Image: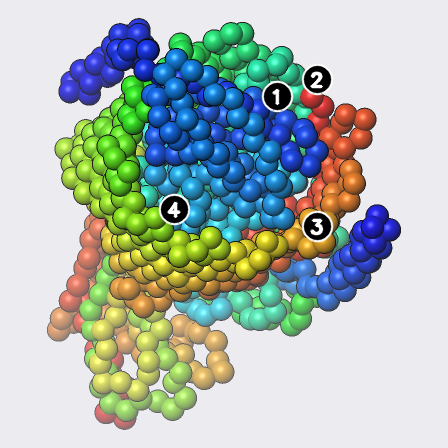
Amino acid sequence: MKFKYILILVLSLLLLPSELLFSQANTNFGSLVGKITDNKTGQPLPGVNVVLVQTVLGASSNLDGNFFVNKIPAGKYQVKATMMGYKAQTIQVDIQAGGKVTIDFKLEETAIETPTLIVTASKKAQSFQDVPNSVSLISLKEIERRNKTYLNEVLEYTPGVYIMRGDVNIRGSSGFSLGAGSRVLLLVDGIPMMPGDSGDIKWDIVPMSQIERVEIVKGAGSALYGSQALGGVINIITKEPTSKPTTHFQYSIGLYDKPYYPEWNWTDRRLDFNQFDVTHSQSWNKLSVLLSGGRKEGTGYQQNGNSNGYNLLGKIIYKFNSQSTFTLQSNWTSVDYGEIFLWRNQHDVYEMPIPAIGDWVNSNKFSTNAVFRQLLSSKFTYKIRTSYFHNDFQHYHHDNNDNSRAKKFGVELQADYLPNKVHTITTGIEGIYDFTRSLVWGDHESYTLAGYIQDELKLLKALSLTLGSRFDYHHVDTGEEDNQFNPKVGLSLRPNFATAIRASVGRGFRAPTMAEMFTETFTAGFRVIRNPYLKPESAWSYEVGINQIISEKLIVDLALFHNDYKNFIEPEPDIYQTVQFTNVANARIRGLEITAQGSLWKRLLLFNAGYTYMDPEDLNTNEILAYRPRHLVTSGLTLSYSIVELGIDYRYISRLEKVKIYPNDPRAAQNVWDARIAARLFGFDLAFNINNMFQYNYWQIERNIAPPRNFVFTVNREI
Amino acid sequence: MKTAIQIKSLFILAAGLAFVILISCEMDHGIEPIRSGISGTIHYVGDWPQNTAEVRIVAATKFPPTDLNDLIIGDILATGGDSAAYTFYLDPGEYYLGLVWRKRNAAWGIQSIFGIYLEQGNPFSPGLIAVPDQKTIINGKDITADFAHAKRATTSSISGTVKFNGNWPQNVENFMVIASTQFPPQSLLDFAFSSLLPANVDSTNFSISAAPDTYRAIGVVIKIVDKPWALDNIVGILLKPGSFELQEIVVPTDTSQIAGVNINVYFSGQ
């Protein structure tokens, strides 16, 4: 009941006219306009972030490179323009009451595509070098280079990140949970987007064509984000509607090669996949709209691998005035796909066990969220967001007809306040309500109420201290309840322009999902039984790191990390192949991560490399944790010349030393090479990728063969 | 300037191509198919139970396997019919083969074995099959699986102590305790087994994972070095106190733990 009152209150606030909330007199304000261009080509630069330093005021440049900031209290300001791949530029302005100041930025391209602003680590924009945690960023350019169907396939190229059949691991956090819970929180534009029942990540909720960039914050993030941000946070930033009417078409077609070993060749059919996306965006005065639709279908590379799905996405932004913005975003995805659980045997790895042939799943997801932002002054801004996530599935399996229908409601009020030059305060309250009706885990409800506060203190010009904490109250209808207090401390020091030193300590937690607590099912010979007495798991994360610009052409980042986990929730199979999620262990994962990126010969050649060493230990048994490799390597080379870009990527994941389901099965490291070529011809962006080009055969979890060599051709056209 | 960039580009391309060719020549290809194994026909006896969820072929490198971790779990087989051909792909080695049955909505365990590959002409001796190399499929290894023995997994058990009196015979490799639901037993599938226990001890505890049933005979059987398991090597039987009658043990439920079953073995020479 309490939750309903909070919901009504927040919705009422959302419906208030912004003029009522914005009560300051207009006479003391001025405005700022300008244009941002590339200093060499003179081309306008869209998407550049313009901020008035030490305020919450700012804007982004539109397709013409123009920006506009209104309602600026009279005074002197530093205006900073930042964009990935360009040097930041700062201009001082003097805003007069009632006046309009015009400034133009001419940004200089950098030799390396370095990240600039990060919005995930502190729930607000901050300079990459000021973030006290390790952060990786996947740019739009990189997403286009990879040319993949789902984001998890792109994340595999990020240092310290690996995927176990859809379960994402950041520095070994997750292991493999059978899709019933994730220790990594997924956000879409800062809004949690995890289903309330299984609590795992649904990678198809945002089409790849709508992703602007992805931020990955490593280490516990519960001090701001609460449950599930135990190992890290992935934030998908989606594209904004354009100011000019724009229609974008994307078509991809892919073809799977024959298996490397003739014994594994299981069909004479052509195995392929294709996808088509069309997006239109347009703006009218105060209203901007983006609509997108797409279809994906494919045969898969395994027996039962067929899939057929559709998605629709809509984004509406309404600017009441320069201080108040309302954003509504909805996304619907529906897919039918063949279920693939285990291969038939190691002689027929692409084929399913005979009884499982024809098993399939219907899965639907719908999310909608509304965000209202308002600047109340140059020092104070707030936003209210509501979110709804619907997830349902129906199994049509030979051994079960499991289904589930889950709804997740979320509401959050967040405020950012800059009382003076030292403090930047971010605070908020959040409520989450989960509801599920399911044959697998029964009918259950739960809710979470939380409050958080963070202060970023600028102690010296080069030294920032971040103090934050969040309190969560979690209640499940079975009577289980839990209080969690998650503090964090972060330090960032910039002794000079080229060096950024960071250190952080934080606590994270994860409440068990309904799937982990209540699942009762049989699938593929395994029985899964409930454990309603599961306790939340928690972790303390420690990290120190240094980001060093060696030269204009080389940046190196080194991080040492140490995570202590308590009451780790893991799926534990017994000798009867019965699986139950239990609080198995206290665990420790420590290690180091080193990344480098650079360029040679005036950006003719770009390179990047990352190495992560992990020591994941079960402290009860002193054995290595299951499903955690010790070594991860990612690297890539890109050669750009004129309209053509050639690239090669390599990733290595060392052999898993311990697995749980079939420990007697042979295991191999992952050694995967990909190649790519992209060109722009006659207004078309063309890309051709060869994935797993040397036909390396491996699995991420037992008895699930990874894709063989495949070829993907994509054409993009914007009108 | 433009020419210099072109030369650099060509140089990088050539170096990259050379690197890729070098890598592709040197690279292994990860997991390989298993090409060797055992094939034959499974003959089902009795009607398929309505509540059958699945039937799998399994292999063990030791006999008896005492839990699922001792088994190499093979293919899920098609259900229905009187017989089915199978090919079980296994690395070179020596294996005992069996069939396990799983009831719908129930787990399966070591009690669920309802068919074992037997030595020719000996219904009490499991057959050991050697797969000699990575290319050979051993053919003609037929298995009879009797649905009368299809049981669900349980946690019930019989446990106790075996006390040995007298001197152990020469060349005993190990021993186990067996419990039969039939007397006299008709086949190996009538038995539930303890794990293998070490020889040359004065006494030892045992535990048999036993599905609910009435066990009409419980005995101790030794294994002679280089000889197969044989009922001829039963050296002790559970008897009623002060009697030469067999002592029956009833396991009433899925979770019954029948303890205190003590067997005396008297070796000749006492």
Q: Position of residue A543 (x, y in %)?
A: 35, 57
Q: Which residue is mark 2?
A: A719
Judged left or right of residue A459, residue A606 is: right
Pointer 2 indicates a residue of which chain? A
The residue drawn where x is 80% and y is 30% is A681
Kind of residue indicated by mark 1: Asp
Pointer 3 indicates a residue of which chain? A
Judged left or right of residue A443, residue A684 is: right
**Is residue A675 visible to us here?**
no
Whether labels 4 and 3 share one chain: yes
Whether labels 2 and 3 share one chain: yes
Task: Please give the label number shown on residue A602.
Answer: 3
Q: Which residue is mark 4?
A: A131
User: As displayed, is residue A39 above or below residue B143?
Assistant: above
- Alpha carbon distance from label 1 to label 2: 15 Å
Mark 2–mark 3 CB contact (< 8 Å): no
Q: Position of residue B149 (x, y in %)?
A: 40, 51
The residue drawn where x is 73% and y is 36% is A687
For discs 4 and 3, the disc positioned in front in the rendered view = 3
- Alpha carbon distance from label 3 to label 1: 27 Å
For discs 2 and 4, the disc positioned in front in the rendered view = 4
